[in-house]
Image (spheres, rainbow, N blue to C red):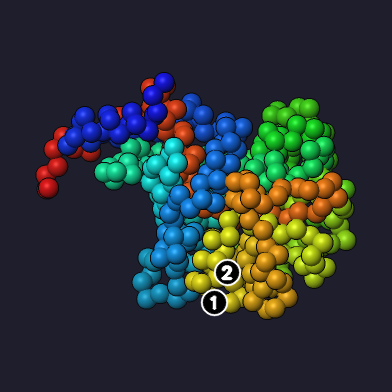
Amino acid sequence: MSDPMICEMEAASAKLPRIDFLYLSEPDMIRAGVTDMAACVDTMEEMFALLHHGDYRMAGGNNNQHGAIIVFPEASPFPAMPKPTTDRRFMAMPAYLGGRFRTAGMKWYGSNIDNRDKGLPRSILTFVLNDADTGAPLAYMSANLLSAYRTGAIPGVGARHLARKDSRVVGIVGPGVMARTSLEAFMATCPALDTVKIKGRGQANVDAFCAWVAQTFPQLHVRVVGSDEEAVRDSDIATFCASVPTGDPSLYPTVRREWVRPGTFLSMPAPCNIDAATEGDDIRKVLDFTGLYEAYREEMPKPVHRFIPAIGVRWFDLVDEGRLAAASLEDLSAIVAGPAPGRTSDDEIIMLSIGGMAVEDVAWGTQVYRRAMAQGIGTRLNLWEQPALK
């Protein structure tokens, strides 16, 4: 079978200057396999190896920025301008990824926590995928599921390399979308899991999560717990997936060293803090990709954790305060690519910071697009037969 990338390029060249692209609705994305978590984890692992070798680009002069964001002022002379309520923003996340992908793309989204009162997701996302040679659009796709599954897959890559192989109990704080996709990824990479503990703020969200687990993973025993401590204690894998307002790190969910038993893998894709004891070198501290955090460090006023609530950002703040050695911070991309070790003993405690990167969207978006093309899924749209301006 010929390489799909070569087929796309040959097809695009044969039709020049006509440009068509594929529109993929959310139902189209589902049909094309966007919710195939096992494949998504494998794709993210492949992406990490490319990151380690430098075959990628993201935004900014350092090529590592998370994206470009529009935020709104506290006071504006324009009454129609949006107000800066919690998570009120527009954001663009562009990237290029090499290897067999060799595509560029951009996720674009608006976010408003009040959307929930309208029956909408907090964030509404779309993604455009482009040919890396001509820059022409290949696809325009619904991206809420794309983003959710690539986000959940990163904890799965982490668990594959950093969790105990015999992990049985996972503790989750925050029973939302991120908790569901993280659990799917853990189930894809840790087949011995048999128990999930869930802690949430609202009973309705906890009930919905429990019902979803019963339907999706009926083999799992579900325990509802009343505190973050109960979620972490005696868990082989623990993860914080709750959304909270940024600005005051003392209010972020906090991991306390006394809760964590030997051998635990701590996956942190959402706001998180640690107590002083957890700063110690008895806990391995792994970044999903060091370059992302170095970019935050360059761009943002210190301490950066006030604005970017990822635990890896806190670690770099501790480096700047002289309380942590920069050399103690490890990199998941190096672990995946091979130069650095994954878990080396059953007693290691390992914490993974997950920041979210545009290359993840490009990797999974490319994979889903190619499945859609192969299976005839989606709607072909025309940009032009001949460009009006050349």
Which quadrant holds residue 271?
bottom right
Q: Is residue 136 left or right of residue 38?
A: left
For the point 21% across and 29% down, the residue is 14
**SS at circle 2:** loop
Residue 339 horizontal/vertical position (percent)? 63, 50
**SS at circle 1:** loop
Residue 140 horizontal/vertical position (percent)? 36, 39
In the rendered view, tell whether residue 88 sits above or below residue 143: below
Labels 2 & 1 near each other (Cβ < 8 A): yes
Q: Is residue 316 left or right of residue 221?
A: left
Note whether residue 93 is visible.
Answer: no
For the point 42% across and 33% down, the residue is 369
Q: Is residue 23 left or right of residue 250?
A: left
For the point 86% across and 57% down, the residue is 259
Q: Earlier in the sequence, mark 2 or mark 1?
A: 1
The residue lying toward the viewer, choosing from 256 and 131, is: 131
Residue 31 horizontal/vertical position (percent)? 48, 26
Name the residue carrying label 1.
301
Q: How many marks?
A: 2
Name the residue carrying label 2.
307
Which quadrant holds residue 24?
top left
The residue lying toward the viewer, choosing from 28 and 238, is: 238
Note whether residue 387 is visible.
Answer: yes
